[in-house]
Image: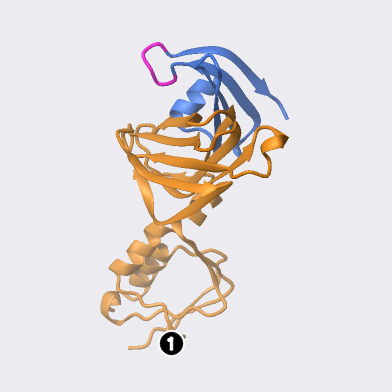
Chain colours: A blue, B orange
Amino acid sequence: MRGIEKLKTGDFNTMTQEEQPDGSVVVTLSSRKYPEIYRFRVKDLYGENEEVLEEEIIEP
Amino acid sequence: MVIETKLDTQQVILGTLIALLRRQFPAINIQEQLSLGIREAKLLLVSADIAKLAGQNLIIDELEGRVAINAQNIGVYLQPEWAAKTGEDKVFNVIASDRAWGYGGETTYVVPTGKTLYITEVASISAAASIGDNEKHQFMELRLGEAGGAEPYSYLGGNGGCSQSFPKPLVYEAGETFTLGVKNNVGHNSSMIGTAQGYEV
């Protein structure tokens, strides 16, 4: 499952968001239910033009 | 009437216990006459079972000796604790780095279908972005959005940060938007972190 899907389904315990100068948001998700960390940069989060620009899955 | 029985299983859900007792003593009106004493016991007890317990008029107070439960695992949890134990706790952070006066950042989350988000506490920290401003005031604003995102639930302020707990959790139903924002309120650039904790069930 991609990070944006985990965000939309609430499949995380901790979420951090940091707005970027270009208006996009870097979202980091982690959970005690899975070991990896999902980090992605998205523009227009929850908007009509939502688009994931970058994504990485950090393995433990 | 006195009921005397022993249950030696390791974990007993109270709802199951009630059903067992009713089968074992069908002639007894449990609602009116059963008193349950628990001493040095451990019982896995979830909130739903507390409701069952209340519905059956069971009383857990002093040891009455009517029902002895030995070698049980008993724990009564507040819902936030139980949510953490079952992995349903939530922590939201917002990071805003090197922001000028009046600027900050925001975390946004739309509660998924079928779930409800409860926020129980918030906290924040603010520090000067440059070492030259480190000894100055570090006023900031922490902002919690109302369900749906229309108006703020709460504005909090502080010099260097703030925190607050909510004895009555803030509730965000499915489809509603939770927002957590920070804003710099001093004349130099600051870096801020806001955090909100709660659970989602």
Q: Is B73 in front, or is A13?
A: A13
Quadrant of the drawing holding the N terminus of chain B: bottom left
Q: Position of residue B161 (x, y in %)?
A: 56, 47
Q: Considering only vertical position in the picture, is B161 above or below A54?
A: below
Q: Name the secondary structure under disc 1.
A: loop
Q: Considering only vertical position in the picture, is B66 above or below B145?
A: below
Q: Position of residue A56 (x, y in %)?
A: 64, 18
Residue B96 visible in the current orientation: yes
Q: How many marks?
A: 1
Q: Quadrant of residue B8?
A: bottom right
The residue singled out by tag 1 in the image is B64
The amino acid type found where label 1 is placed reads: Glu
Please report the residue visible at 55 percent of the width from the left and 51 percent of the height from the top: B85
Whether the magenta-drawn stretch holds residue A48 is answered as yes
Residue B169 relative to residue B40: left or right: left
Q: Considering only vertical position in the picture, is B129 above or below B125?
A: above
- Magenta span: chief secondary structure: loop
Please report the residue visible at 44 percent of the width from the left and 47 percent of the height from the top: B156
Q: Is B9 in front, or is B137?
A: B137
Q: Quadrant of residue B33?
A: bottom left
Q: Is B21 in front, or is B101?
A: B101
Quadrant of the drawing holding the C terminus of chain B: top left
Q: Which chain does tag 1 point to?
A: B
Residue A43 relative to residue A38: left or right: left
Residue B188 relative to residue B67: left or right: right
Q: Position of residue A42 (x, y in %)?
A: 51, 17
Residue B89 visible in the current orientation: no
* Region of the chain picked out in magenta, as a range: A45-49
Q: Dot 1, how many residues are within 10 Å of its Cα: few (below 14), some (14-19), or many (20+)?
A: some
Q: Is B24 in front, or is B106?
A: B106
Whether the magenta-drawn stretch holds residue B96 is answered as no
Q: Considering only vertical position in the picture, is B44 above or below A34?
A: below
